């Protein structure tokens, strides 16, 4: 994967994004508003795998997703995915400990550990608008009533991004 640090030219970023996503078999599209003079991002292109958006930074691809734990375990066991994940990514070694628990409507379940009402309100406020998975709320034991998902990945190689997409398609997490 090309390190784009210091490259401030949109054509270089867009060309790199187009090439990397094409190799990985992932669709790319123009960011909304990229044609406006107020647009501040360097790249005008980004990617999407099924309904999961992704973003290219200087050194990696960041994916926001809802990957079921069973698929996340396959990803964590795949040597190409592991080699191409950002170092320290928790989903590499133990996706269960990195899992978020969602209810059947896609809302994030947070474990109630006795925090103050003010603390909980602050957390919920910070999460509002940041979650593509729905609302968030506190429950006694998310694991008893929720479904485990990994909600994000960061890949540093095109090969890992491609394998990730292949696994999600094979597991029917995203359309084939």
Image (spheres, helix red, strand yellow):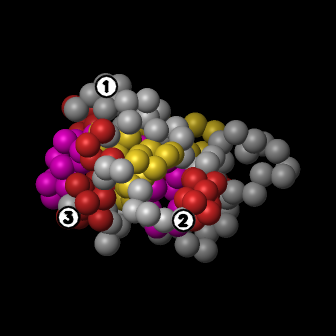
Q: Residue at x 58, y 53 (%)?
A: 124
Residue at 35% from the left image edge and 25% from the top image edge: 175
* Range of magenta residues: 54-79
Q: Which residue is mark 2?
A: 116
The answer for how far apart the CA atoms under marks 3 and 2 are is 32 Å
* Residue that numbered label 3 is attached to: 93
- Magenta span has 75? yes
Where residue 81 appears, as percent x and y from the top left, is: 24, 55
Is residue 98 among the parts visible in the rendering?
A: yes
Viewer-proximal residue among 34 and 51:
51
Q: Would you say the residues marked 1 and 2 are in contact, meaning their CB atoms lie under 8 Å apart?
A: no
Q: Disc 2 on helix, strand or loop?
A: loop
Question: Marks 3 and 2: which is nearer the front?
Answer: 2
* Left or right of residue 9: residue 86: left
Which residue corresponds to the image point at 30% horizontal and 58% vertical from the top-left?
98
Look at mark 1 in the image and give the residue it sits on: 176
Q: Mark 2 packing: few (<14 Cα in 10 Å), some, or many (20+)? A: few
Mark 3 closeness class: few <14, some 14–19, many ≥20 residues within 10 Å: some
């Amino acid at each position: 994967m090309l390190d784009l640090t210091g490259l401030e030219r949109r054509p270089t970023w867009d060309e790199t994004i187009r090439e990397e996503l094409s190799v990985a078999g992932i669709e790319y599209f123009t960011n909304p508003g990229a044609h406006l003079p107020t647009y501040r991002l360097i790249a005008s292109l980004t990617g999407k795998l099924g309904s999961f958006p992704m973003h290219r930074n200087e050194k990696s691809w960041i994916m926001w997703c809802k990957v079921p734990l069973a698929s996340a375990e396959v990803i964590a066991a795949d040597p190409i995915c592991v080699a191409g994940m950002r170092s320290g990514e928790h989903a590499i070694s133990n996706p269960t400990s990195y899992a978020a628990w969602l209810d059947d409507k896609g809302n994030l379940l947070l474990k109630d550990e006795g925090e103050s009402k003010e603390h909980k309100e602050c957390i919920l406020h910070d999460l509002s608008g940041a979650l593509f998975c729905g609302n968030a709320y506190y429950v006694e034991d998310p694991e008893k009533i929720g479904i485990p998902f990994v909600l994000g990945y960061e890949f540093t190689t095109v090969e890992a991004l491609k394998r990730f997409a292949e696994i999600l398609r094979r597991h029917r997490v995203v359309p084939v």
